[in-house]
Amino acid sequence: MKLEDLLRISLACLLLVPTCRAGDPTPKPWPSQFHALLFENFTTDGNSKLSIIDLWYDWKNGRNYNIIQDQLGHKLWDAEWNNGTAFHFDLEQKTCQSVWVGVGILRPDFLSDAQYVGVQTVDTFTCNVWNKLDNFITYYEEVETQRPVGWLFYTGRFEHVITFEEGAVLSDSYWQAPEYCFTDEAGVQEESLDSGLILQNEGREPLERWLNGLSS
Ligand SMILES: *[C@@H]1O[C@H](CO)[C@@H](O)[C@H](O)[C@H]1NC(C)=O
Ligand SMILES: *[C@@H]1O[C@H](CO)[C@@H](O)[C@H](O)[C@H]1NC(C)=O
């Protein structure tokens, strides 16, 4: 760094002490492909609903899967595409909704403009913590390894990361939505306010704020 840049940053820090973020850690961008097993605890009004989610993030191919098994309940397949379309289907019940989400999948660096909160212990791991969009999401990353440990949505969904396999890819055949997604009855619907899914699907208004955050 050039001396004059250093001086400029130092001066900015002196003048803007509360907002000076020059030394704050930044979250590690997501690998362009990974598989994570998530344990979700969705708590609202003191009631907790538990799910296991297989997250297959595949930025390279512009797609993201959440395969959501509710405790003693249904398994929902949520395939999201970068063109703004998602398919929610249930292979046992043979039901499908094709959903217009209107935004693509998360960019690997979607947290690059998040605000640093500090260090906290989460699930026994010492983590750096960030907030994005007024607590829309709080993100926990292990200090030592920079692995994601979990994230929490303002709605009360807490995703605990159980496994995190960088570079893992789900083979193409799994991404093909079933035939009954493409019949007239299946139709296309706008994203509902709470469809039980994770990132993009936490409501219309936050979705827009999310999008703004992403495109800035
Ligand atoms: C789920 O989260 C709630 C609220 O934090 C907590 O009281 C409860 O023990 C959690 N349940 C499990 C199984 O982690
Ligand atoms: C988006 O991509 C998926 C997967 O290729 C495709 O099935 C869907 O029809 C596309 N949606 C639009 C609006 O083009």
Image (spheres, rainbow, N blue to C red):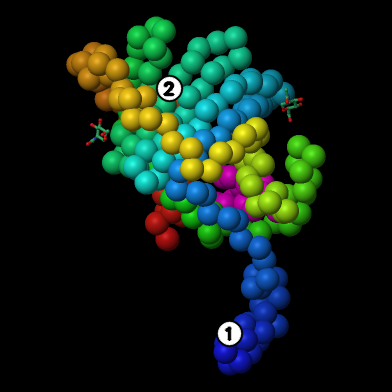
The residue identified by callout 1 is 1
Residue at x-position 31% and y-position 34%? 85
Residue 192 appears at what percent x and percent y?
41, 27
Residue 100 appears at what percent x and percent y?
31, 33
Q: Closer to the N terminus: mark 1 or mark 2?
A: 1
In this picture, is 55 found above or below 88?
Answer: below
Residue at x-position 39% and y-position 12%? 91
| Location of the N terminus (image quadrant) | bottom right
Which residues are the magenta region?
Answer: 128-141
Residue 213, numbered label: none
Q: Quadrant of residue 10?
A: bottom right
Residue 146 appears at what percent x and percent y?
65, 52
In this picture, is 123 found above or below 196?
Answer: below
Callout 2 amino acid = Trp
Is disc 1 in contact with disc 2, using a CB cutoff of under 8 Å?
no
Determine the secondary structure under disc 1.
Answer: loop
Residue at x-position 42% and y-position 31%? 170
Mark 2, Cα crowd under 10 Å, few <14 / some 14-19 / many 20+, is many
Is 139 left or right of 190, judged from the image as shown? right
* Dominant secondary-structure state across the stretch colored magenta: strand
Q: Quadrant of residue 205?
A: top left
Residue at x-position 64% and y-position 73%? 22
Is 191 left or right of 55, judged from the image as shown? left
Callout 1 amino acid = Met
Determine the secondary structure under disc 2.
Answer: strand
- Can you tell me which quadrant of the image ligand 1 is in? top right
Task: Tell me the CA gap for discs 1 and 2.
Answer: 48 Å
Residue 116 belongs to the span the image colors magenta: no
The residue identified by callout 2 is 77
